[in-house]
Image (spheres, helix red, strand yellow):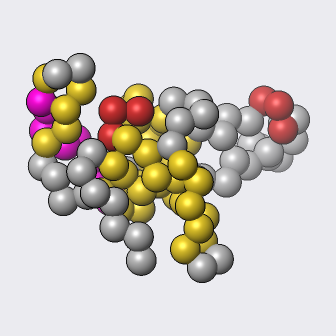
C-alpha cells in the first residue's frame, strides 16, 4: 500500500477507450490519456500553491485531469499508479 505524504496524491490511470458509446472506433492519437482517478490522498488538509494555502479539494475516487509529463510512475505489485503533486492536478472532471 502506497500512502502519499505532504502535497502528493496517488492517481490510478483511466484506460482510454478507443470506441464511442455508439460503436465508432477512434484512433489512439485522438484519445486523451491525461485523466486519472484519485486512489489515495495524503493526510494534509491544505495545499500550498504559489505561496498561497488552499483547502485540499481532492478526495478518493475523484476523476481528475493533470499536467502532461508530471508525476512519477510507481508500481505496487501488479497495479500501476502516478504519484503527483496536488498542484499539478488541473481539474476535477464530473
Q: Position of residue 74 (x, y in %)?
A: 56, 61
Task: Tell me which corner region of the image, top left, top right, bottom left or bottom right, holds residue 4.
Answer: bottom left
Residue at 67% in and 35% down = 32
Q: Quadrant of the N terminus?
A: bottom left
Q: Residue at x 27, y 45 (%)?
A: 7
Residue 22 x %, y %: 77, 44
Residue that appears at 16% across and 52% down: 44
Question: How far from the left and from the top, in percent, is residue 25?
Answer: 87, 41
Residue reaching furthest to the top: 50
55 falls in the magenta region:
yes
Q: Residue at x 82, y 31 (%)?
A: 29
Whether 65 is drawn above or below 74: the answer is above
Verify whether residue 14 appears in magenta. Answer: no
Horizontal side of residue 51 vs 27, given as left or right = left
Quadrant for residue 60, please give it: bottom left
- Rendering quarter of residue 85: top left
Q: What type of secondary structure mainly makes up the magenta span?
A: loop
Q: Which of the pair 93/88 is nearer the observer?
A: 88
The stretch in magenta equals: 53-61
Q: Is residue 24 visible?
A: no
Amino acid at each position: 500500500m502506497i500512502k502519499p505524504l505532504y502535497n502528493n496524491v496517488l492517481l490510478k490511470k483511466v484506460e482510454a477507450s478507443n470506441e464511442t458509446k455508439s460503436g465508432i472506433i477512434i484512433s489512439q492519437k485522438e484519445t486523451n490519456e491525461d485523466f486519472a482517478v484519485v486512489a489515495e490522498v495524503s493526510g494534509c488538509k491544505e495545499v500550498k500553491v504559489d505561496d498561497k494555502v488552499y483547502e485540499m479539494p481532492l478526495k478518493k475516487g475523484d476523476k481528475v485531469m493533470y499536467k502532461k509529463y508530471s508525476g512519477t510512475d510507481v508500481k505496487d505489485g501488479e497495479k500501476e499508479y502516478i504519484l503527483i503533486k496536488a498542484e499539478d492536478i488541473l481539474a476535477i472532471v464530473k
